[in-house]
Image (cartoon, coloured by chain):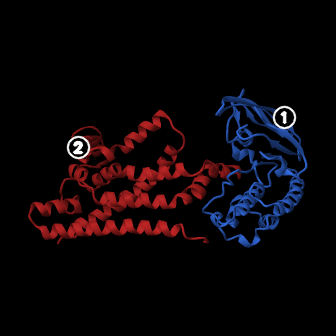
Chain colours: A red, B blue
Amino acid sequence: MDVTPIWLTLKLAGITSVLLLAIGLPVAWWLSKGRSFFKIIIEAIITMPLVLPPSVLGFYLLLAFSPQHGIGKWLQHNFNIRFVFSFEGLVLASVIYSMPFMIGPIKSALQQLPLSLSQASYSLGKTRWQTFVKVLIPNIRPSLLTAVVLTFAHTLGEFGVVLMIGGNIPGVTRVASIAVYDSVEEMDYSSANTYSFILFAITFILVTGVFIFNKYQLKSPLE
Amino acid sequence: MISVDIEKKLKTYQGEQLLKINRQFPPGSITKICGPSGAGKTTFLKIVAGFIKPEKGTITAENVTWLDTGSNIFLSPQKRMAGFVFQDYALFPNMTLQQHLEYATNDTAWIKRLLSIGKLDNLVTHKPQYLSGGQQQRLAILRALAIKPKLLLMDEPFSAIDQKMKTALINNLKIVFDELGATVLIVSHNPQELEGLPGEEINIHY
């Protein structure tokens, strides 16, 4: 059995989770503070991948980043960056597709923190950034971990959007979920079963790990 | 001298009410603010601290304008540096008792003194969720004092502290207030709770 699809999947999920954590934290913080029509629209756009068929999202990404026109042509011409049928394209699609899984839990957790926590920090002369780093983030740690694991696990299972923008290039864009589909098409049920079991096991271990960690967090009275 | 002249609309179950306060608080004075629930006592403290903007008004402290809605001046809470004791304590769940005070100040001698005033010396490694209600409330008071504020705003600060502890704490606090020269505004819905504290008493109601 070729292990490259598994390695590629883990690499994709890892890079996507790190990028989304960096993007998701400030965006979730901004969304958690107050409501405006503009924020509602942004939140709706971020949530779209939850309800949109992955093939639709993949199709629009394919059109947008096609090297024949628009942004895709501009990127290829000026920076020699090509998102279609490349690993970079998979990362871009995964970041967009998994965004609600990162931003949703972080935003909810920040909204559930009492406003007085931030106010107490401000009254001690601390800036918004100091308050965010020293008070808010440490107090949403379980939700932060949940968001990262959900994002990672969701990226492991991507199929439609990945197939549309990345195709099925061995060693480049052929991730495990596509390898499962390919193996079934070729009637190679043994390989399909192995790929599927590995994906299932990784996801199960991750989700169980989060539950155990979050339970342990509530039990620690002292540092 | 802290001068406050503000107007703020409050939404209550009886409809919209106007909170209107025009007072001066001399330096080093203690003012007890009483009134029924929902009268706007907490809102008033939060306006002074800079957490809430009133529709109209001015606040000046020692000739510095903190708020002037006419001139669009609004000094942030960070710049006002008013010590604030929150009704819900607002303790940081991730920090131990010691870390709360270290977050507010680097002055280790002052931290040691505060711990002794609050009789919390032996609980420094505990996080808030493992402290009793009274211990949490004392920590909230100590954290507000840690920045050595010139203005201290206290919202129902003794509600969870037992009578014996409260008497001892108030005696120590009076000394600290004098040392800091702090102007203190204390809110309570129950005037008896503030027995033992000197100072003027004002009522807020609509």
Q: Quadrant of residue B108?
A: bottom right
Which residue does the numbered mark 1 point to in the structure image?
B23
Say which chain tag 1 marks. Answer: B
Of marks 2 and 1, the one in the foreground: 1
Q: Is residue B8 above or below residue A206?
A: above
At x 66%, y 54%, the residue is: B90
Q: Quadrant of residue A136?
A: bottom right
Task: Identify the amino acid type marked 2.
Answer: Phe
Element marked by disc 1: strand
Number of marks in the rendered image: 2
Residue A111: where, in percent of width, then height? 53, 48
Q: Residues within 10 Å of mark 2 (few under 14, many from 20)?
A: some
Residue A38: mark in rendering: none
Q: Is residue A64 above or below residue A154?
A: above
Q: Is residue B82 left or right of residue A180?
A: right
Residue A169: where, in percent of width, then height? 18, 58
Residue A59: mark in rendering: 2
Q: Is residue B126 left or right of residue A189?
A: right
Residue B103: where, in percent of width, then height? 68, 60
Q: Quadrant of residue B6?
A: top right
Task: Identify the amino acid type marked 1.
Answer: Arg
At x 48%, y 48%, the residue is: A28
Q: Is residue B154 above or below residue A174?
A: above
* Residue A23 visible in image: no
